[in-house]
Image (tube, coloured by chain):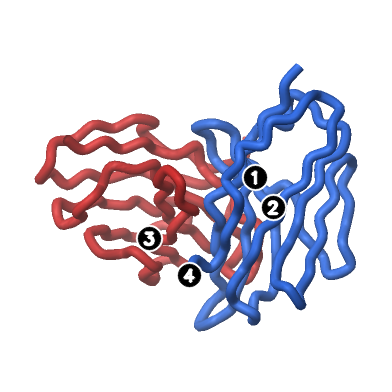
Amino acid sequence: DGGITQSPKYLFRKEGQNVTLSCEQNLNHDAMYWYRQDPGQGLRLIYYSQIVNDFQKGDIAEGYSVSREKKESFPLTVTSAQKNPTAFYLCASSVNTGFHEQYFGPGTRLTVT
Amino acid sequence: RKEVEQDPGPFNVPEGATVAFNCTYSNSASQSFFWYRQDCRKEPKLLMSVYSSGNEDGRFTAQLNRASQYISLLIRDSKLSDSATYLCVVMVRSNDYKLSFGAGTTVTVRA
């Protein structure tokens, strides 16, 4: 089945630790995205990538880093510099950045204490 | 001002009822408009695009009013399975295409 997978579903970390969230897609999509969702707020774009080995900052990139070494994979690292890392993180992909329909993975709920 | 604003609800309606809600957007250069559906603690999924002339998809009708900068979603003959949060999404092109998401309107359909 084609789709997007994210792991793990739930993640707990201590403050000060970096953590990497996994996102893999087998839809052969060029574009991939990372969003965070907080209660009462819309999804906010962290980073996006249009093509392998290229990525762009979104609206809230501070404290995050990404890589795009393979078309299928777009991992997100939440660093200790992110002030409020506890959130629901959603990875998405689309055919390209000009194509509006984005397919989302099931998300990772990160809790940092 | 938020780029996309929605009434959070919740809209509590009985099965079979009609429910409608709006979303306003601030950027007059917005090009495309969509409704996504998000079930509790799940990922969003595209429900339907919104076309200038308005469009229907089964029991769902979407309308766009560019002059007043809002879009609407109407659900007829509500089913229990329609209970979800509906996200208003707007596409703007600046340096690249960007989707802006509203915080969502929650609909609860009761038996």
Type of residue at label 1? Tyr
- Find numbered disc 3 in the image and state the secondary structure of the residue it sits on: strand
Q: Quadrant of the C terminus of chain A?
A: top left
Check whether the beta carbons of the residues at disc 3 and disc 2 lie within 8 A of each other.
no
Disc nearer the start of the sequence (2/4): 4
Do pointers 3 and 4 mark residues of a single chain? no
Please tell me which residue is depicted at 64% across the width and 34% down the height of the picture: B84
Within-10-Å neighbours for mark 1: few <14, some 14–19, many 20+: many
Which residue is disc 4 drawn over?
B1
**Residue B98 in which image quadrant:** bottom right
Q: Across the whole image, how many numbered discs are drawn on residues?
A: 4
Check whether the beta carbons of the residues at disc 1 and disc 2 lie within 8 A of each other.
yes
Measure the C-alpha gap from mark 4 to mark 1.
Answer: 20 Å
Within-10-Å neighbours for mark 4: few <14, some 14–19, many 20+: few
- Find numbered disc 4 in the image and state the secondary structure of the residue it sits on: loop
- Determine whether B105 is above or below B95 in the image: above
Which residue is disc 3 drawn over?
A46
Q: Position of residue B40 (x, y in %)?
A: 54, 31
Q: Quadrant of the N terminus of chain A?
A: top right
Q: Position of residue B92 (x, y in %)?
A: 60, 74
Which residue is disc 2 drawn over?
B35
What letter labels the chain drawn in red?
A
- Determine whether A53 is above or below B27 in the image: above
The answer to whether A42 appears left or right of A28 in the picture is left
**Residue B34 in which image quadrant:** bottom right
Type of residue at label 2? Trp
Q: Position of residue B103 (x, y in %)?
A: 53, 51
Check whether the beta carbons of the residues at disc 4 and disc 1 lie within 8 A of each other.
no
Measure the C-alpha gap from mark 3 to mark 2.
Answer: 21 Å
Measure the C-alpha gap from mark 3 to mark 4.
Answer: 20 Å
Please tell me which residue is depicted at 72% across the width and 21% down the height of the picture: B110
